[in-house]
Image: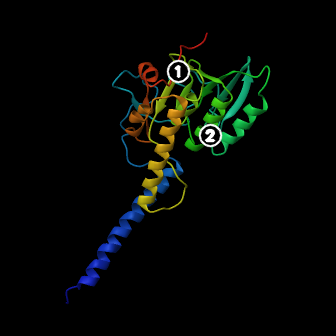
Amino acid sequence: MSEPNEGTTLRRALMGVLGFQVLLALLLFLGDLGEGFSLPGRGGDAPGLEQPTAPGDQTRRFAPTRPAAPGVTPSGPMPERLVLTERAGAWHLSGAIAEGDGARVARQIAAREGEGAPQTLFLDSPGGSVHDALELGRAIRSAGLAVNMEAGAICLSACPYLLASGVTRAADPEAWVGVHQHYFGENTLLPAFTAVSDIQRGQGLVMRYLEEMGVDPRMMGPALMTPPDEIYMLTREEMLEFALLTEEPRT
């Protein structure tokens, strides 16, 4: 049996590299779909969100469908996309951030601007589309709204970018705010290097946005170190240090 020549060996090596890239890109693609699949992480070992946190012990499993914060009896399921309502002279925004929500909710706020329009927006969201969170965040800042969180409310994943948009920002001590890594780009099968490029560009856009809002981009530190299937719960001291909060909650 003859030994393979150099050309055959090179072709086999190239096919092996190509196969690895396709497999890695497929994993990124499946993870980006967000339907219960994510890249390997420590999510199975991290405590559940219902467990209390303390400084140095702040990483919990990410539960994007959780209807309410730990220790709070939910009044109903979390909406699958953002729902904006007006109650007692304030906006209340709840639900996951779905594609298209940024422009849609921005139009609702703009349509109500003028005398007597709400000047405060209360958040309760497990996060979702980063692109839509940044788009809506800029609209909230343009409208000059204060952003608050009530006791028991959650603001996870992409939601803190909405919290960052307020001209003033406050959260009840019993509200929960958490950050983690995000997926960026389209749901298409791309070479691994292209997917990595999309992620880097997306993180750059987020950091620029935080600077625009007057929030310290160092907030991205714990986010970048926390896998998408986990969530890093920010302490009140961290939120004040990063200027994500600017004042005490209103009574």
The image quadrant that residue 113 belongs to is: top right
Task: Name the image quarter holding the C terminus.
Answer: top right
Question: Tag 2's secondary structure?
Answer: helix
Report, in whole angstroms, how far the alpha carbon at label 2 lies from the one at label 1.
Answer: 24 Å
The image quadrant that residue 20 belongs to is: bottom left
Q: Which residue is tagged 1?
A: 175
Q: Residue furthest bottom?
A: 1
Q: Which residue is tagged 2?
A: 135
Instruction: Count residues near mark 2 (Cα–Cα under 10 Å), then give few for <14, some for 14-19, many for 20+.
Output: some
Instruction: Count residues near mark 1 (Cα–Cα under 10 Å), then give few for <14, some for 14-19, many for 20+.
Output: many
Q: Nearer the viewer, residue 103 or 11?
A: 103
Residue name at image x 56 percent, y 14 percent: 249
- Residue type highlighted by circle 1: Ala
Residue name at image x 70 percent, y 24 percent: 91
- Residue type highlighted by circle 2: Glu
Q: Is residue 37 visible?
A: no
Give the vertical position of 15 relative to 149 (above or below). Answer: below
Image spot of residue 54 (x, y percent): 37, 21
Residue name at image x 58 percent, y 29 percent: 165
Image spot of residue 139 (x, y percent): 66, 34
The image quadrant that residue 124 belongs to is: top right
Question: Tag 1's secondary structure?
Answer: loop
Q: Pick whichever of labels 2 and 1 is earlier in the sequence.
A: 2
Task: Name the image quarter holding the N terminus.
Answer: bottom left
Image spot of residue 138 (x, y percent): 62, 35
